[in-house]
Image: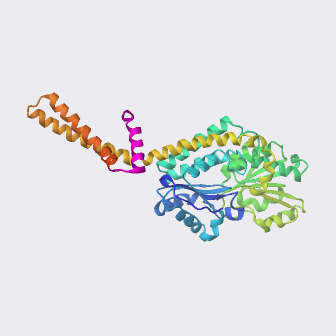
Amino acid sequence: MASTVVPGPAGLYALGLNHQTAPLPVRERVVFHVERLREALNEMKTALATEAAILSTCNRTELYFSAEHPQEAARWLAQYHRFSPEELAPYLYTLPADRAVRHAFRVASGLDSMVLGEPQILGQMKEAVRQAEAAGTLGTVLHKLFQRSFAVAKEVRSTTSVGTQSVSMAAAAVKLAARIFPSLREQSILFIGAGEMIELCATHFAAQAPARITVANRTVERGSRLAHRFNARAIELRELPEHLHEHDIVVSCTASSLPILGKGLVERALRARRRRPMFMVDLAVPRDIEPEVAEIDDVFLYTVDDLAGIVSANLDARRSSVEQAEAIIDAQVGHFMHWMRSRENVPLIRALREHAEAARQDEVRQALRRLQRGEPPEVALEALSRALTNKLMHGPTQALGESEGDEARRLAEALKRLYPGSK
């Protein structure tokens, strides 16, 4: 959903795509891998933004930045991921000023997630902030935006039911597996990866007391730590060809930029299993399992997008709290935008104070010279106060005298607000 943008206050923008605007094949191409994130942030700050942060998850890739020309960020994002600008544009949204602030608050609160109220996004946003801080691209505006986002998310989760009940991708995966296998107690489960999502899935599946659990990870040490929690065994990723056929259920979520399980490897595993079915869940973006695996008979492959319909059936309680959460967010957006507008007036306030200070210092010098000439102190003070008053009032009175019509009326109203005693 491309959008026409009018630059907003302070040039704050959110630009990106998510599960609502882009299909999985597009989303998995527009992913920033952690090892290149600092490089990308530095590119943004050098080429197009004064401040920048990048949020890249399974369901969204978003740029938060402060700049004059947001269209340059859209072109940069497309080129960085080897799209033409026209090819990527239909999937992008560009949100200026208060819309960017509201979006950040909704994302942090779980209102914009595929699973309403899911908590993982908050940790992912905090990691995005840490990465931007480490890269030196997080300035005053974005720091304030994200800190306020985290505070809003805390308020939403503590005062509404948006984050209640066990509704997650992990719970949905268990529910799907139960449709394929009458009882998970007789099944062997393989988890590929050892991150937060796999840990959550392992917790849900382990509660069903499966026959065996295996954790495969690139580093066996990290895999072993997770396996120990669930009385499971740990193997390295390179051992997958030898052990894949032993498992009825496979859940994968790694940060690999290339597929880990290809069609040929899965076909060999099925032959070794004598065509007993395999249930596979790919929660990674980019995908860990080649899409062609879904074409194989006896394989039931689901992606993050496939799970969306499963989780939606259990969200009634959370949806009833959305209106309350949105009201909290609206109020906080107003507070943040007031802060943004006050920042715009800082240079003017500084200039006014400098002008007044210069007038004060000049008149103090004049008063000291009068005292040195022997004038009475009360005469010097009277002259100082009269001259300082005239200097400070000269600008407003001259502007009022030279204005006409609507301008004069607006200026008069402004002066009445500035000097209430003049009404």
Asked if residue 302 lies left or right of residue 95, the reply is right
Query: Dividing the image into 4 quarters, which one contains the C terminus?
Result: top left
**Can residue 187 be seen at all in this image of the molecule?**
no
Is 408 contained in the magenta span? yes
Identify which residue, 224 or 9, lies in the foreground.
9
Q: Which residues are magenta?
A: 402-423
Asked if residue 364 lies left or right of residue 51, the reply is left
Report the magenta stretch's main SS: helix
Identify which residue, 172 or 273, lies in the foreground.
172
Would you identify the image quadrant in which residue 95 lies?
Answer: bottom right
**Can residue 238 be seen at all in this image of the molecule?**
yes
- When the figure is inspected, residue 311 is found, relative to residue 273, above or below; the finding is above
Residue 28, given in percent of the width and then of the height, sits at 67, 62
Residue 138, given in percent of the width and then of the height, sits at 49, 51
Residue placed furthest toward the front: 405
Identify which residue, 342 or 129, lies in the foreground.
342
